[in-house]
């Protein structure tokens, strides 16, 4: 298994199908447009490659918050259905933790869908704890 950091749009675009497993309604055009907006704001991605096949990936952000200081935020963490429960997710998570330590970040955070119990178990096994609730409000403009 090779883990590879991606920082450019052209590197991220081929992994649309895997990201779509998390967000089924996402279109390729939205994926492209949103990545173009995200990358200049400290967004990167790491992929888990089994030969040429991408079997897992996670995006991540770098930021600061008053309550926790500098942090790495995991975003869109996904392992291909046929590659789950064989250590791909753990390898991605270890990479994230090492990257956070290497950069001197004080925290790692993430959001998980309320109904995604398998993800909850995975994150608890990797030392995360639930700290709050993430709220979302859809506006009439579609944003």
Image: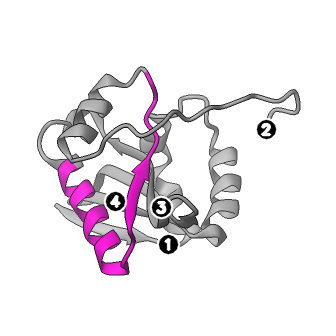
SS at mark 3 in the image: loop
How many marks overall? 4
Question: Viewer-proximal residue, 110 or 89?
Answer: 110
Q: Residue furthest front?
A: 67
Question: Viewer-proximal residue, 142 or 117?
Answer: 117
In this view, the mark in front (2 or 3): 3
In this view, the mark in front (1 or 2): 2
For the record, the magenta segment spans: 90-114
Question: Viewer-proximal residue, 42 or 7?
Answer: 42
Please state the horizontal and vertical placement of residue 72, each as a whole percent of the image: 44, 63
| Residue identified by numbered label 4 | 47
Q: Disc 1 to disc 2, how far (Cα)?
A: 25 Å
- Tell me which numbered mark, 2 or 4, is placed earlier along the sequence: 4
- Tell me which numbered mark, 2 or 3, is placed earlier along the sequence: 3
- Tell me which numbered mark, 3 or 4, is placed earlier along the sequence: 4
SS at mark 1 in the image: loop
Give neighbour class at mark 1: few <14, some 14-19, many 20+ (Cα, 10 Å).
some
Q: Would you say residue 92 sits in the magenta stretch?
A: yes
At 42% from the left and 43% from the top, the residue drawn is 18
| Residue identified by numbered label 2 | 143
At 34% from the left and 70% from the top, the residue drawn is 100
| Residue identified by numbered label 3 | 68
SS at mark 2 in the image: loop
- Tell me which numbered mark, 1 or 2, is placed earlier along the sequence: 1
Q: Which mark is residue 7?
A: 1
Give neighbour class at mark 4: few <14, some 14-19, many 20+ (Cα, 10 Å).
many
């Amino acid at each position: 298994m090779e883990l590879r950091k991606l920082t450019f749009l052209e590197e991220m675009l081929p992994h649309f199908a895997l990201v779509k497993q998390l967000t089924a309604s996402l279109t390729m055009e939205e994926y492209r447009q949103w990545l173009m907006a995200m990358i200049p704001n400290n967004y990167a991605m790491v992929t888990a490659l089994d030969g040429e096949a991408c079997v897992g990936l996670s995006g991540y952000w770098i930021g600061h918050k008053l309550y926790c200081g500098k942090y790495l935020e995991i975003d869109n963490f996904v392992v291909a259905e046929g590659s789950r429960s064989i250590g791909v997710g753990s390898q991605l998570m270890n990479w994230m933790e090492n990257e956070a330590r290497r950069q001197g970040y004080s925290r790692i955070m993430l959001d998980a869908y309320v109904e995604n119990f398998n993800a909850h178990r995975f994150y608890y096994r990797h030392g995360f704890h639930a700290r709050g609730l993430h709220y979302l409000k859809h506006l009439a403009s579609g944003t």
